[in-house]
Image (spheres, rainbow, N blue to C red):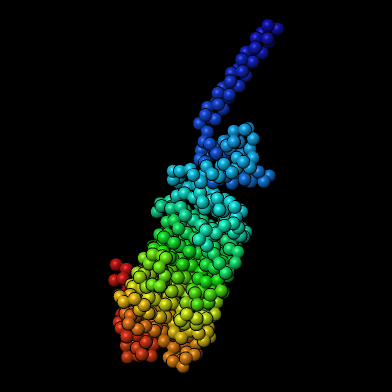
Amino acid sequence: MKLKKLKIFLSGIVVANLLLSTSVLTSQAREYAVTGDITSDGVFDVADVISLQKWLLHQEVSIADWKAGDFCQDNLLNIFDLCLMKQALLSHSLQPSQKNIISVATTEELKIALASAKPGDEIILAEGEYLYTGATPKGRMFIAEADGTEKQPIILRSEDSQHPAIISGTTTGSNYALTITGDWWEIRDLKIKNASKGIILDNSNYTKLINCEVYQIGAEGIHFRDNSSYCLAESCKVHDTGLVSPGYGEAIYVGSSVSTKDYGYDCNYNTIRRCELGPNVTAEHIDVKEYTTGTIIEYCTFDGTGISGEHYADSFVDIKGNNCIVRYCLGYRNGCEKINHAFSMNQIVDGWGLNAYIYGNKAYMDTALNAQGKKMYFLNSWNCSETVWDNFMAYESGELFSIDAPDDQWDYYNCSDITYGDASMESQLWG
């Protein structure tokens, strides 16, 4: 009997010690807990804000450390804590992490994720439509202002590329759907619609737009603007633009006109690759403005259906910058009578519109004469300079034929300063 009591007594000591140890560990854990880190992953970030928001909305989400979210210090977790948490996050200086997955499913969550983004963040949008609400400073709706880095870009993408999330504005008459002002962003697998302008890059460098569809837009679809350089649009689809302003409904616009004074002109070394542009792009599919250098347009497809002819929109591509390359593209006039030639070059400013390389392209132009009764030129250019080779055209029969015999220049190239090159020059271009 005494032995049994002794065992019970010793067991009680063990249990007491275990409880004491647990209490000490819990106390130590709270001492080193990160304020706001309700997910207990060691970091206070937008994932904690989203988790608390979902919890308050009675969605299925677990909170690992509710005390970390008690910003009011009243032993309650409510909307007041959420407000203070958002303020703390927006003012909190975070160190870059290797990678931080942020899953969002509502417009408000997307706004928070963009406002709080840091290098290495991957913002993943669940399938559905993200319709913008609220104020629009400078006409901007969804805004990405943070800078990523070369090794840690900030990624914004759909959870399922086969069922893309839709970022939507409120009207084609005003405002920009998505504006990127930070460097080193990757925007992937998204649909952008219902705004005056689709995707605008302002002073954004090294940003990539990949597999995005832009449509139902009042003016231009994608614009590399205000000193945005070394950016990429790849495998994007842009159609149904210029619904409000047909003469300004370009699919992709590089730089700014000399008459525009509010934006920096140095939009250099941007690449447009494997994009499908049109139908119902009312202005040029690609407009490369004066003061820009080194734009590359390659492997793109142009559907001329719907070009309006307004504001001199009468070709697939209009080049006014220097050192542009247009190669391996396909153009289809598709009976659009407003298209008078496949490609254009124009000198708007002295010293610009020079040194283009245009090669390896095919233009199906339907007819040898345009609606003005003039020759259907492959390239219309004056006071500009260009080097061409290995380009082909087709007329009514749809059969392609070479247009690069110098004796036939004025049949296919209406150019005052043209050089006929050959394939050996490509290796020189790419070093």
Tell me what residue is drawn at x 55 percent, y 53 percent: 111
Q: Is 326 located above or below residue 5 in the figure?
A: below
Q: In this view, does 39 lie to the left or right of 151?
A: right
Residue 417 location (% of width, % of height):
30, 83
Residue 240 location (% of width, % of height):
56, 73
Tell me what residue is drawn at x 51 percent, y 69 percent: 221
Asked if residue 304 shows in the view, the reply is no
The residue positioned farthest toward the bottom in the image shown: 373
Q: How many numbered marks are there?
A: 0
Residue 27 location (% of width, % of height):
55, 26
Asked if residue 83 shows in the view, the reply is yes
The residue positioned farthest toward the top in the image shown: 2
Residue 4 picture quarter:
top right
Tell me what residue is drawn at x 53 percent, y 77 percent: 246
Pick the quarter of the image with the C terminus. Answer: bottom left
Residue 378 picture quarter:
bottom left
Q: In this view, does 150 lie to the left or right of 278?
A: left
Closer to the camera, 72 or 283? 72
Pick the quarter of the image with the N terminus. Answer: top right
Q: Is 34 located above or below residue 172 in the figure?
A: above
Q: In this view, does 289 lie to the left or right of 142?
A: left
Tell me what residue is drawn at x 49 percent, y 90 percent: 371
Q: Is 345 located above or below residue 23 in the figure?
A: below
Residue 358 location (% of width, % of height):
37, 77
Q: Is residue 408 left or right of residue 14?
A: left
